[in-house]
């Protein structure tokens, strides 16, 4: 779920958030409103999570674009994830964009660059 659909749907639609595929053509781009934008992944049951990762075009080319890749951005889209993030969880059954703010617990807030 997300605060708004992608203006670039269907290529960058909400289901791309956690589909297991990498690359620009398999990524989600959130819509611009409301602000701040948010997105979430509803898991079917209580789940232990040991790490998280921000995806982008993980590349099939060199990071400095000296070797082009077959996907967008010359193989590396290194402008996609920077910003301030708040990582939260909820135990509410079937959470979505209408879950009240008070039902979320913040785990961490950080800047990603």
Image (cartoon, grey):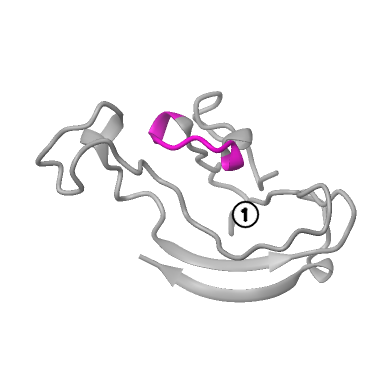
- Name the residue tied to disc 1: 38
Q: Is residue 19 magenta?
A: yes
Position of 60 with respect to 95 (left or right) is left
Residue at screen point 18% across, 43% down: 62
Q: Quadrant of the C terminus?
A: bottom left
Query: Which quadrant of the figure has residue 107?
Result: bottom right
Position of 76 with respect to 80 (left or right) is left
Residue at screen point 66% across, 48% down: 3
Up/down of 34 relative to 85, above or below: above
Residue at screen point 39% across, 60% down: 82
Up/down of 61 relative to 51, above or below: above
Q: Quadrant of the N terminus?
A: top right
Position of 65 with respect to 9 (left or right) is left
Residue at the left extreme, as displayed: 66
Q: Is residue 94 magenta?
A: no
Given residues 17 and 84, the one toward you in this image is 17
Residue at screen point 63% across, 34% down: 15
Residue 85: horizontal and vertical position, in percent? 53, 66
Residue 23: horizontal and vertical position, in percent? 39, 35
Given residues 95 and 61, the one toward you in this image is 61
Query: Which quadrant of the figure has residue 58?
Result: top left
Q: Which residues are magenta?
A: 17-25
Residue 45: horizontal and vertical position, in percent? 84, 53
Residue at the top extreme, as displayed: 10
- Please count the marks in the image: 1
Residue 46: horizontal and vertical position, in percent? 82, 59
Callout 1 secondary element? loop
10 Å neighbourhood of mark 1: few (<14), some, or many (≥20)? Answer: some
């Amino acid at each position: 779920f997300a605060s708004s659909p992608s203006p670039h749907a269907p290529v960058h639609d909400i289901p791309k958030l956690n589909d297991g595929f990498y690359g620009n053509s398999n990524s989600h781009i959130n819509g611009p409103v409301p602000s701040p934008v948010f997105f979430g992944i509803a898991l079917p049951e209580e789940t232990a999570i040991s790490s998280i990762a921000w995806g982008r075009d993980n590349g099939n080319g060199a990071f400095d674009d000296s070797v082009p890749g077959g996907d967008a951005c010359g193989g590396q889209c290194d402008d996609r994830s920077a910003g301030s993030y708040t990582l939260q969880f909820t135990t509410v059954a079937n959470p979505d964009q209408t879950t009240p703010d008070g039902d979320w617990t913040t785990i961490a807030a950080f800047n990603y660059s």
